Image (spheres, rainbow, N blue to C red):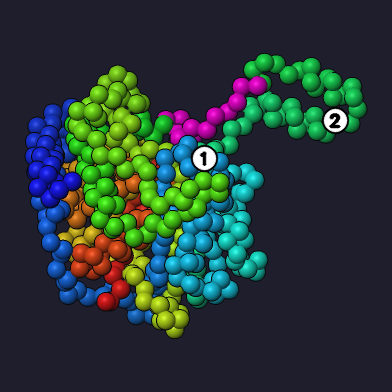
Amino acid sequence: MGSAAWRVAEIKMSSMLTSAIRNLPASSAWAARVFARSLSCSSQLQAAAVQPKSKKTLAKSGVKNIVVVEGVRIPFLQSGTSYADLMPHDLARAALQGLLNRTSVPRDVVDYIVYGTVIQEVKTSNVAREAALGAGFSDKTPAHTVTMACISSNQAMTTGVGMIAAGQCDVVVAGGVELMSDVPIRHSRKMRKTMLTLNRAKTLGQKLSLISKIRPDYFAPELPAVAEFSTSETMGHSADRLAAAFAVSRLEQDEYALRSHTLAKKAQDGGLLFDVVPFKVPGKDTVTKDNGIRPSSMEQMGKLKPAFVKPYGTVTAANSSFLTDGASAMLLMSEEKALAMGYKPKAYLRDFVYVSQDPKDQLLLGPTYATPKVLEKAGLTMADIDVFEFHEAFAGQILANLKAMDSDWFAQNYMGRKSKVGAPPLEKFNTWGGSLSLGHPFGATGCRLVITAAHRLKKEGGQYGLVAACAAGGQGHAMIVELYPQ
C-alpha cells in the first residue's frame, strides 16, 4: 500500500472508530454508567518516531538487574497449515534452536529452561524437557513446564526472573508453545474406566464380563473446548457479554480488528517483526512469516455471522484471534552475566504483577486490574509509558478493557480505587499488530509481547513499555519493560 493510500485508509479508520464509539447506545447497567471514551486512531501511527526521553531508570538498590538478551519465535501459523503434522515439542525445539543460532550462547551456559503451554500433549507432558533435549541442550540442564492459560509464557518468564533474582541461576531460557492442529481427544470417562479395569482383569471370564457391559454411548469422545471449567462458558460467550456490558458495538470490533491486521501487515512488509526466525518444516518448505495476517474490508467483515451468541452477538471469526500453532523462546540473564559474556541486552524486565477476578463476569478484564497495580509498583503513570503491548484475545475484549480503564465509575465500584488509571492512547498501542492478526498460540504469546515491546522501544526512542494480558480463569498479568541504555 502506498503512503497516500495508507494515509487515506488511516484517516477513514480514525473517523469510523471515533464516530462509532461516540454514538453507542448505553444498553446495559455497566454501559449506562461507564464513560465511552473516544478511541480515535491517531495520525501519529504514521508519524516520525518518538523522540528519546530522559527518564529515571527503574533499577532498585539491592535488587539484581535482569535483562532480555534476545527473544525469538518461529512464524505463528493458522492451525491446520504447515505445522499440522508436527508435535508441540517440535515447535518448541525449533524456537530454541532459533534462539541458539541468533545468540550463539553456549548450551552449557544455560542454567535452567522454563516453558509455558496450555493444551498438553500427554506423550510430552513436560514439553520444556523434551524440546531442550531435542535442541541439543545438556541432559544436565533442568527444565520444567508451566501452565497459566494465555499467560503461560508470561509465567515462564517471571519464573526465570525469580530464579535469577534469588541467585539460583544466572542464565534462564523461557518460552512457550502451542499446537492447536493436534489436540488430545479422549475416550469418555465410562470407556476409560472400563479399559483400565479390563487391564487389571486376570481371567478370560472377567474380561468378557467387562466387555459385555460396554454400551454405544461409551464410544462418544470427549472433545476439548476453550471453555471455563468453573462456569462451562466458552471464552467467546464471555467476550460477547463483556462487549455488550460496555456497549462495544460490532462496528467498533470490526474496525479494531481491521486496524490490527492492517498494522501487522505494515510491520511485516516493513521488516519490523524482528523476532521471527525461519523454520524448515520436515518434509515441507521453510516457513518464514506469519500466515494469519489478512487485512480485509469492513464490507467483507460485516457479512460474517456471530460466532457465539446467535443471532444477536457481535463477536465473529473476523474480530477474534484464530487458533494458532507456534512457539517462542527468550534468553534471560543477570545484567552482570550478560555483560561478562559480551552481550548487549535489549531490555530490563522490571516490576510485574498477576491478578485474578470473577471468571464469570470479568473473565477478560485482567489488563484493567493489572495495569494500575504494576504502574504503582514501579512508581510510574500512564503518561510515562511509551509503548503498550496488550494481548488481543478478541477485539471486544480489548475495547472493553480500554473503556473500563478510562472509567472512574468502574474503578470506584469494582476495583476499590478512587479514580481511573486512564486508557492507553492508540498511537502507542499495539502498533505492529497483535494477537488478532499475528496469531495467538496460547502458551507462546507472552514472550512475543515482551520482545515486541523491547523492539518498539528501541525503534521509537522510548524507555518504558507496558505489557498486559488476560487469561482463562479470570486471571491477568502486567509487566514493565525498560529499554536497555543504547
User: Is residue 303 located in the magenta-colored stretch of the structure?
Assistant: no
User: Is residue 221 located in the magenta-colored stretch of the structure?
Assistant: yes
Vertical comparison of 449 with 340: above or below? above
The disc labelled 1 sits on which kind of residue? Ala
Pointer 1: what residue?
84
Vertical comparison of 306 with 132: above or below? above
Q: Position of residue 127 (x, y in %)?
A: 58, 53
Which residue is at 45% across, 70% downward? Answer: 103
Residue 186 placement, left or right of 118: right
Instruction: Determine the image quadrant of residue 376.
Output: bottom left
- For the record, the magenta segment spans 219-233
Q: Position of residue 226 (x, y in %)?
A: 45, 35
Quadrant where the C terminus is found in the figure: bottom left
Vertical comparison of 49 with 179: above or below? below
Pointer 2: what residue?
201
Residue 152 placement, left or right of 194: left
The crowding category of the residue bearing disc 1, from other C-alpha atoms within 10 Å (few below 14, some 14 to 19, many at least 20), is some
Label 2 to label 1: alpha-carbon separation: 38 Å
- The prevailing secondary structure element of the residues shown in magenta is loop
The crowding category of the residue bearing disc 2, from other C-alpha atoms within 10 Å (few below 14, some 14 to 19, many at least 20), is some
Q: Position of residue 36 (x, y in %)?
A: 14, 39
Tell me the element at label 1.
Answer: loop
Vertical comparison of 403 with 69: above or below? above
Tell me the element at label 2.
Answer: loop
Specify which label sits upstream in the sequence, 2 or 1: 1
Query: Of residues 97 and 373, which is closer to you in this image?
Result: 97
Which residue is at 54% across, 38% downward? Answer: 182
Which residue is at 59% across, 66% downward? Answer: 137
Which residue is at 32% across, 53% downward? Answer: 468
